Image (cartoon, grey):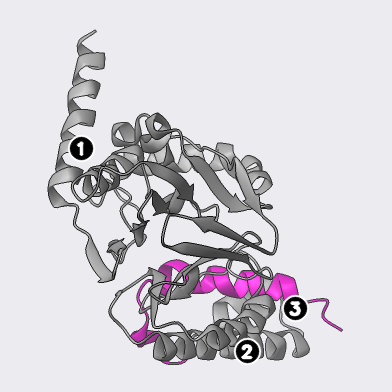
Amino acid sequence: MKRAALALILACMASAHAAETFTVKEIAPGNFVHRGHDDVATRENGGDIANIGFIVGTCCVAVIDTGGMLAEGRALRAAIRARTKLPICYVINTHMHPDHIFGNAAFKQDHPQFVGSFKLAQAEASRADNYMRALNRELGDEAKGSEIIGPTKTIDGTGTLDLGGRTLKLQTWKTAHTNNDLTIYDDKSGTLWLGDLLFVQSIPVIDGSVLGWLDDIPRIKQMNPRHAVPGHGPIDSSWPVALDAEARYLTQLASDVRAAIKQGKTMQQAVDSIVPEQGDTWLLVDQYHRRNVTAAYAELEWEQ
């Protein structure tokens, strides 16, 4: 009983701390973004490492990703309620990664439609056990109540959501960061929410296809939004500059991996020998570059 009471107290303290430190910025009319930490998920940052936020129409609100655990989702909901009493109609997940979805449960009381790519549910289901184990390992008791809530509305290609006086255009993409990437474009403000198709300063992470990502980038550029929200990193940077930097890293990675394969190097030899050019300009290189080499090698090894 004492242990259960202590766990409850700790969970309440974590939730209160998240609410106190949680801030959002209106980057364009009706578009509010919370800037995550440039880090991996830890107990110190509460899994708050992704950029998440919401869009307000005249009839209702759409949430864009919900953070790395229930407490962060609750802090996001509190930030919404501090600005509007309009109903929360949609919770949109840009892809399946834990730092973007584990706050979903904070919005169950609003009975929204949970929206994602048509590939999202299968991707979440196939990794659910691993994600939950990692969440409990990294965040411990603070993660209590966090859960994966799959989509109730899916997008295959393109779709629209009406918030009242504001239409959101949703689009799925070729496998890139993941196989279930989804972007949201607010036509009224010209704001494009890119999820993890755009990393700023933090190194891009491949959990899908390096070649697909490189194919997607020119299509993103053609959309030419007035504002763009990255999945990670500063929200006030020039998106064309950031997208070009991302493309350079991915292009060099593919080139280096192809060269290693041509030289007959094993995957481990490639991982040990390939270092990113201007690696000191990226954050979290040590955590993710070797993983990116592994993913690219597996993809390109049998390339014709």
Q: Residue at x 28, y 48 (%)?
A: 76
**Left or right, 268 with reference to 262:** left
In-front residue for pair 225/278: 225
**Residue of label 2:** 256
Whether the residues at callouts 3 and 2 have beta carbons within 8 Å, the answer is no
The span shown in magenta is: 277-304
Marks 3 and 2, how far apart at CA: 11 Å
The answer to which of marks 2 and 1 sits earlier in the sequence is: 1
Q: Is residue 207 visible?
A: yes
- Mark 3 or mark 2, which has the lower sequence index? 2
Helix or strand or loop: what does disc 1 sit on? helix
Does residue 120 appear in this view? no
Looking at this view, name the residue that lies furthest to the top. 1
Closer mark to the observer between disc 2 and disc 1: 1
Image location of residue 155, percent across then percent down:
65, 55
Position of 50 relative to 288 (above/below): above
Asked whether 50 falls inside the magenta stretch, the response is no
Residue visible at 22% across and 65% down in the picture = 25
Q: Badge 2: how crowded within 10 Å, few (<14), some, or many (20+)?
A: many
Q: How far, Cα to Cα, is label 3 from label 1?
A: 44 Å
Quarter containing the C terminus: bottom right
Magenta-highlighted stretch: main secondary structure? helix
The answer to which of marks 3 and 1 sits earlier in the sequence is 1
Residue that numbered label 1 is attached to: 14
**Residue 30 lies in what quarter of the image?**
bottom left
Q: Which corner quadrant holds the N terminus?
A: top left
Which residue is tagged 3?
300
In the picture provided, is 266 more to the left or to the right than 243? right
Q: Position of residue 58 (x, y in %)?
A: 35, 54
Q: Quadrant of residue 226?
A: bottom left
